[in-house]
Structures are given as structure tokens and as C-alpha cells.
Image (cartoon, rainbow, N blue to C red):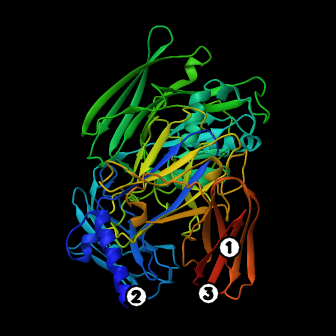
Amino acid sequence: MRTFSLTISLLLAALFLSFGFQGDKSDKLLVNNVVIQFEGTNANGNNLWLDNFSFGTRYPNDLTVRTMSLKDKNYFMPGVSSASITPVVTVLNAGRNLSSDATITLTDQASYTSTKNVGSVSGGATINVSFDPLTFNVNTTKNLKAYINWAADQNHNNDTLTQATVFLAGVQKKILFEAHTATTCGPCASQNPYLDAFIQNHFDSIVPIKYHVWWPALGDPMYNADIPQQRVRTLYNSVSAVPTLQIDGVMQQISNYSTESNLLNPFNTRRAMGSPIALSVTDTRLTGDTIKATVTINVVSALPSNIDYRLRICAVERTIIYQTAPGSNGETTFHDVFRWMYPNSDGISINYTPGTYTVEYKYKRDAAWQDTALYTAVFIQDEYTHEIINAAKSRVTYFDDVKLPPVTDNSVPSASFVYEGNNVQSAENGFAVENMEGTFPPVGWKLINNDFNFTFWQYIYAAIGGPSFPGSRAIRISYYTYAENIGSTDVIKSKVYNNVSPSDTISFDWAYANRPGYSDRLTVKISTDGGTSFPFTIFDRSGATLATAGSSTSSFVPTSGQWGTFSICFMNATSAGNQGELIANEYSLRQNYPNPFNPVTNIEFNLPKSEYVTLKVFDVSGREIAKLLGEKMGSGLHTVSFNAAGLSSGVYFYKIEAGNFVSVKKMILLK
């Protein structure tokens, strides 16, 4: 007992010295203003994926309110001053155990209260809970509060989410259809006519732009005419297949244009949304081949805070007809073809103060562009979420002689209000998790793009999610297709975390396949001053040491088992002298993480030189359970995953042999 007390006393003394706190209360050990920074450095290697960032100690029972479907600022359609909506709140089971018998209440803290059952939610999973309808009047703010009631909950710091919500006056918006196609794409030839017909039938409400891409084979003349901007826009939209349609930057439909509902449903959803910005554009032909685009921007209501809205101006050719097919798929007629973006693909910042503003931009028509078919398309886009705020085009009619397949429009007028979001996140203490299943960047996080290209740190993209929490989405960083600005570094910063305990664990999942001859890099750092400085580096790997899967010369999308998980104790991460993730010039076997685990854990070891390595797992009787490695490995830090799905709970041992180095450590499987 005396030895145990002495150990605790020494530990507390070390904590006080490490964090510079004084006092005799345990809460003095808590640290505020903690920010985590992820830095990606481009080498045009392969795609890097991030998922499931968490901070703290995971509890067995822990439900948390994640998001509300309402934004803090929402916009009515013209003429609408009141509407009844059905709020939806997303609940995450941040714990390990299945939840049951929990309820959640939503109130405006005045006259509205609605309580619903949460239902059973598996550990790491989410569930959407719909509440009774709530009436909003224009310009009237409601202070919404959602909170969980669950007797078994062990962490009450994340049970409540509050948000001031208001509906403001808005305008009818036009919908941006950004299609991606190619003359070398067989399915494009059969699908494009249906998309063209839908656009023609809704030409007064849609702003269409078609980008031509460089796959499945090179040779598309419309792509070749403006390779840099076509490529940038395709990557910006995170498109990896054709035909693909991006609707208002936030809804994606891959092929199947012949099924009308695939186009009509997202169109109606977006069309029902009021916009805080009215937008129009007119073209004037000046002397010679110069076209003056006059863009009118009317900010009718207050805009959200912390935004980056950009105006983009595009030259679009309504119809291009070739006498013979220019590609392998047989197409000869192409509509709404993207020609160029002005002044460049970065766009123009706009004025956020309510009022009317005019932007004039003059551009020269290329000799290859048919003047009678040319028009200007404009749109305002949120750089962080990629959402299109509004769009407009100078052309109001289409060519009557275009032969298109008949498409029946069975659209039903949508509601005159809209709510959408996932933009509000609870301020958590005790255990915080960002499972990358909502918008990107997550609320409170910040994207810093140093080359203004936005092909790094792309918005959350459909993929096989990381192993720490279930899900189908992750962040993709497109090193594979980004040959420009080699060596440039782009950053995402987490929100600020307070009340951090020295014993809390920082953890995230990542996946990467090394492309031989290239060496992309990921560095993760910690700030304890709110993000002003980042003196502590907890992760710094590149090339083969960053890889969690075998090497690949094709664009990498992770599958199950191709992820790694990094975890580190906050106290160790911010200890004196930790100015980098130093790989010692010696052999070492690290403690597995997570530990205890269920059913997957990661084992790290370091080699100062190339060695033949065996890594095995044994039970308490000394019986070999699994052989994880038996091959020659290069120098550096390595990570191996162990899946114990078929084993029973208990204590196991893992043993490494590398040259004359032998080490054994204990791990605990807890199901």
C-alpha cells in the first residue's frame, strides 16, 4: 500500500511540473485551449485517408448529441413568413456498449417540448431522431436545446446541445448541375441524352456545366482544350467516375440518369431551399471577340459567420456538334460544355453585408468557341462545405432543334421552407469524437489551404470507413492526382478542446498505400495555446512508413483491414522534450493500441536497420495463436494490425524477434 501511495504521489508531482499548474484540487490538472493540427505535404504519391478522430477516454456507456438538422441561419422562400418543420437530431453512441432505454428531449425553452425514445444504438453507431413539428416565424430566433436522459450514461459532459436558430427572408435559387463526362466513356453516350432532356425541361431553373475528364482514356478534345481547369474542377468535386453529376456541390448522382427520380428528387430538394443571395448575370458583346459579363449580387439577409463564399464566372458553350465522333463512344453532340473559368478557378470573394453589388468581368472568346452558342454561367460557393448558395446563367433559351429522348416530368411542388445542416456539434468534455460522417470540415475545425487549389483535404468522401467507429465516409487527400505544387503543405485544425485530462488519449484512423518512387507526408501536432503555436509533434511519417496497405500504382481506396490506428496519451504527447515523433536509432516494441481492445489492435515496432522479423501472438499457456509477420522489414517504425475476432476475452502476449532483439508485451482482449 505504501509503494502504491508513493507511486501516485510521484505521478501527481510529475503532472504538476509538466503542465505548470498550482493548487491542491484535481481539476487544476485539466488543460484548456488544446488544438490538434493535421499537416499534409504533397509528393504526388497516393491518396491518404483520415477518419474517426477522438480525444479522451472512451466510456462503456456514453450517448452524445451530435447534430441538429437545422442550421443556425435558415432561409424561407419568397413570400413565406411562417412554416412548421420536423426537427431531426443525430445521436452518437460514443461508448462501447449497446444503449437501451434512453430518451432525448428537444425544447425551445419557451413553449415547445418534445421527448422521443432513442432506441438501441450499437457502440460507435449513430441514429437520427425525429421530433414533433415546430413552427418558425420569420426573423424570430428560437433557442433550441436537445438533451439525453439515460440512467446508465457515464459521461454527462456531452449530453446537451444548444443552438440559436432563426429563419430569415430568402430568395428562390437556381440549381447548379455540374456533370462530368468524357468522349471515351461508353456509358456517358447512353446516359447523357437523359440528363440533357431533364436540363432542357427545367432550363429556367438549372444552371448546367459539363466538365470533360481524362479517363477512362485520353483523347477528349474538350478536355484537351483546357486541361488545368477541367482537372481542378473535377478534383474539387472529388469525382472519380463518369458519368457523374454533382448537384449544388453537395448531392452526387453517379450515372442512372435514365431513372428520372435520380435527377428529380435532388433537384426538388435543392429547389425548395431559400437562398440568402439573389444572383443574375447578363452578357454584352463588345468590340471584337470581347464579352462583358455583368453579375448582380443581392445579399438579402444576414449570412452565417465563419464562411468563405466565392463567386465563379464560367464561359459555357451550349451546343458543340462534331461531324464525326471525336472519341470512342460515338457521341457527336455535346451540350453545356465548360470552356473556362474567370479570373481563375479560385473565384472572387464577395461582400457579405446585406445590399446589392455589381461585378463586371470582360473575357475574350476563343476562336474555337461558337459565339451564338456561348453564354456565361455564374455561381456562389462555400469553399469549406462546397455547397452552392445560388447560381445563374445569361442564356434563357435552348436550341429547339436538339433531338432528345422524351422525359416525363412528374414533379410535385416542394415545401416552401428548407432545413438542412449537420453544422452544429456539441462541445464535449470527457470524450469527444469526430467520426467524419457529416460535413467537411467538421464544425469548429478549420481548413487552411496554402495553394488555394482545394485538391488536398477534400470534403468527406464515400469510402470504407476506419475501424475505430462504424461508418461509410472519411476524409480523402488526393495526392495521387495532384502533380502541381509538389512539396506544398495544407492544414486542417481541430476545434478547441477544454478540460483535457493528462490521461486522455488522442486517437485517429488513417489509411495510405505507398506509390513507389513517391513520398507523401502526414504530420500531426498539438497546441496548448488555442492554435497559435504547435510545439508538440505526435505523428510524422512519409512514404513507406506512412503506409497501412501494400504499395500501389493506382488510385488508393482503402478496404477493410487496410487502416491503421494511432493513439497516444496526452501527457506523453506534451511531455518536456517532445518536439517531434522521434524514431530512436534502436530496436523497440511498443505497447499495442488500443488496449484493452475488441477485436482489432495495432502493434508498433522500430528497427534501426533492415532485419528479418517474426511477430507472433501467444495465449497465457504459451500456445502460439497467430503469426503476424515472418519477413524481412526495412528500417524505421512499422505498424501491424491484429484481429482477434475469433478469440475469447483474456490476456494474450505478443513477441517480436528481429536479429538479436527479442521483446514480449502483454495485451488484453475485452469483448
- Quadrant where the C terminus is found in the figure: bottom right
Q: Circle 2 is placed at which residue position?
A: 152
The foreground one among 631 and 281 is 631
434 above or below 621? above
Residue 296 placement: quadrant = top left
Q: Secondary structure at mark 1?
A: strand
- Quadrant where the N terminus is found in the figure: bottom left
Q: Secondary structure at mark 3?
A: strand
74 relative to 47 in the view: left or right: left
Kind of residue at badge 3: Gly
The foreground one among 184 and 325 is 184
Which mark is in front, 2 or 3? 3
Residue 17 percent coordinates (x, y): 29, 65
- Residue 629 appears anywhere in the view: yes
Residue at 61% x, 45% y is 239
Which mark is in front, 1 or 2? 1
- Residue 465 appears anywhere in the view: no
Q: Which mark is residue 153?
A: none
**Marks 1 and 3, how far apart in space?**
17 Å
Residue 20 percent coordinates (x, y): 26, 63
The crowding category of the residue bearing disc 2, from other C-alpha atoms within 10 Å (few below 14, some 14 to 19, many at least 20), is some
92 above or below 227? below
Total numbered badges shown on the rendered structure: 3
Q: Which mark is residue 655?
A: 1
Whichever of callouts 1 and 2 sits on the residue coming sooner in the sequence is: 2
Whichever of callouts 1 and 3 sits on the residue coming sooner in the sequence is: 3
Q: Circle 3 is placed at which residue position?
A: 650
**Marks 2 and 3, how far apart in space?**
25 Å
Q: Secondary structure at mark 2?
A: loop
